[in-house]
Image (tube, helix red, strand yellow):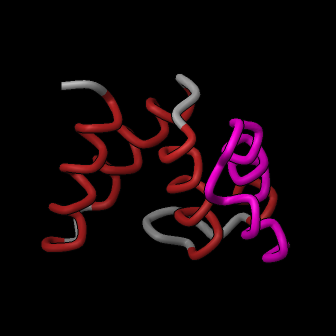
Amino acid sequence: MNCIAKAKCTMTVRVLSGIIPEAFKWFKKAAELGNADAQYELCKTYRYGQGVERNNYEAEKWLRKSNDHKQSPYDLDIHLF
């Protein structure tokens, strides 16, 4: 199972049981490998403090990385910062 698939599965578990650190670990791994969806999930995690301390700097950093991908669906979210 690749990182993003593992992260998505873990996110489902996270929502159902509140296990956030495991999901964060897999999203971060996938984001560091350049996955735009995972980068956007990290943005939201930091923006809303889901399992990590709220950090607008990190949130914006990951949003910008996700927007670096051609045809990113997240371009419009930059107005949040």
Q: Residue at x 32, y 50 (%)?
A: 23
Rendered image quadrant of residue 54: bottom right
Horizontal side of 25 relative to 68 (left or right) equals left
Which of 2/74 is in front? 74
Name the spot of residue 45 as percent of width and height, x first.
53, 63
Q: Which residues are magenta?
A: 60-81
- Name the chief secondary structure element in magenta: helix
Which of 3/49 is in front? 3
Number of residue marks: 0
Which of 52/36 is in front? 36
Name the spot of residue 4 as percent of width and height, x first.
34, 37
Against 58, is 13 above or below? below
| Residue at far front of view | 71
**Is residue 17 magenta-colored?**
no
Against 24, is 69 above or below? above
Q: Residue at x 80, y 66 (%)?
A: 78
Horizontal side of 72 relative to 6 (left or right) equals right
**Is residue 78 magenta-colored?**
yes
Location of the C terminus by quadrant is bottom right
Against 71, is 56 above or below? below
Q: Residue at x 76, y 38 (%)?
A: 68
Name the spot of residue 57 as percent of width and height, x first.
81, 58
Against 38, is 58 above or below? below
Horizontal side of 3 relative to 68 (left or right) equals left
Location of the N terminus by quadrant is top left
Q: Residue at x 47, y 70 (%)?
A: 50
